[in-house]
Amino acid sequence: MLRIAVLVSGGGTNLQAIINAKGDGRITDAEIVRVISNKKDAYALERAKENGIESVVVAREDYDSRQDFEKALIGSVDGAKPDLVVLAGFLVVLPEELTRKYEYRIINIHPSLIPSFCGKGYYGLKVHEEALKRGVKITGATVHFVDSGCDTGPIILQKAVEVCEGDTPEVLQKRVMEQAEWIIMPKAINLIAHDKVRVENGRVYIN
C-alpha cells in the first residue's frame, strides 16, 4: 500500500480529485495518510476532515525563521512516513534537504504543458493569464517529479487542453483542472502505486 502525504495551500481541488479517484477505483493500493497545509484557513483542511484524513498545519508565521519553518515542514512530512509526497497546489518552495531526501518520491501538478509557462512566478491564475496573453491555442497540465529547481523535474504525464475564443483566465483555469489536472494527477499516483514508473538518465519511462 502506497502511503501518500499531500501538501496543500488552498482550496484542495486536486486533493479532492485524488480522494474521488480512490473512491471510484482509479487509484488502488494507495492511501492518503496525512494532509499538510502551510495555511491555517485552507479549505483543503476541511476536505481532509470530511474524509477522515489526518491533517497538520505548518504555517510560516508560527516560526521565528525560515530555517525553523522548513525544519518543521520536513518533520511533518517525515512523521507521515510517506512513500510518495504529492504537491497539490502547495505554494512553498521546498527546502533542498526535502527534495534530496525524497528524490523521485515527490510529484507536482503544474497547469501548463511544461516547458511552457513554468518556473519562478508561474502559478495559479498567472499561468493562464500568460497563456492567453501569448495567444496559444493549446495549453494543458503536467505532472512531474520535483527536484531542487522550479518545475524542472522529470515529466511523468501531460494532457493537452484547447484554448477557446473568449476564454478568461478563470474559465481556462477551470477547463484545465477538469480536463487535465484532475485526470492525470490520479493517473500518475496509480501508476506509481503499481511500480509502473521509472526514471533513467533524467527521463521518465512508464512500464
Image: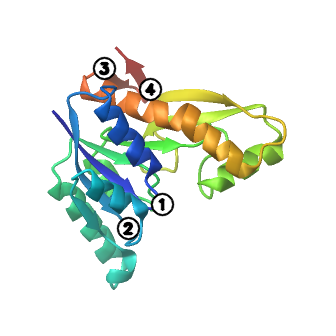
Please tell me in which quadrant of the rendered image residue 188 appears. top left
Residue 158: assigned label: none
Q: Work out how far the residue at label 1 is from the one at label 2, CA to CA, in angstroms.
A: 8 Å
Q: What residue type is labelled 1?
A: Leu
Circles 1 and 2, Cβ within 8 Å, touching? The answer is yes
Q: Work out how far the residue at label 3 is from the one at label 4, CA to CA, in angstroms.
A: 14 Å
The residue at 32%/73% (across/down) is 69
Q: What element carries label 1?
A: loop
Q: Nearer the viewer's eye, disc 3 or disc 4?
A: 3
Q: What residue type is labelled 4?
A: Arg
Residue 203: assigned label: 4
The residue tagged 1 is 91
Residue 151, image x, y percentages:
52, 45
Q: Is mark 3 on a helix, strand or loop?
A: loop
Which class describes the residues within 10 Å of circle 1: few (<14), some (14-19), or many (20+)?
A: some
Disc with the residue nearer the chain's start (2 vs 4):
2
Which class describes the residues within 10 Å of circle 3: few (<14), some (14-19), or many (20+)?
A: few
Disc with the residue nearer the chain's start (3 vs 4):
3
Residue 206, image x, y percentages:
38, 18
Residue 33 to residue 116: above or below: below
Q: Work out how far the residue at label 2 is from the one at label 3, CA to CA, in angstroms.
A: 31 Å
Q: Work out how far the residue at label 3 is from the one at label 1, CA to CA, in angstroms.
A: 28 Å
Q: Nearer the viewer's eye, disc 2 or disc 4?
A: 2
The residue tagged 3 is 196
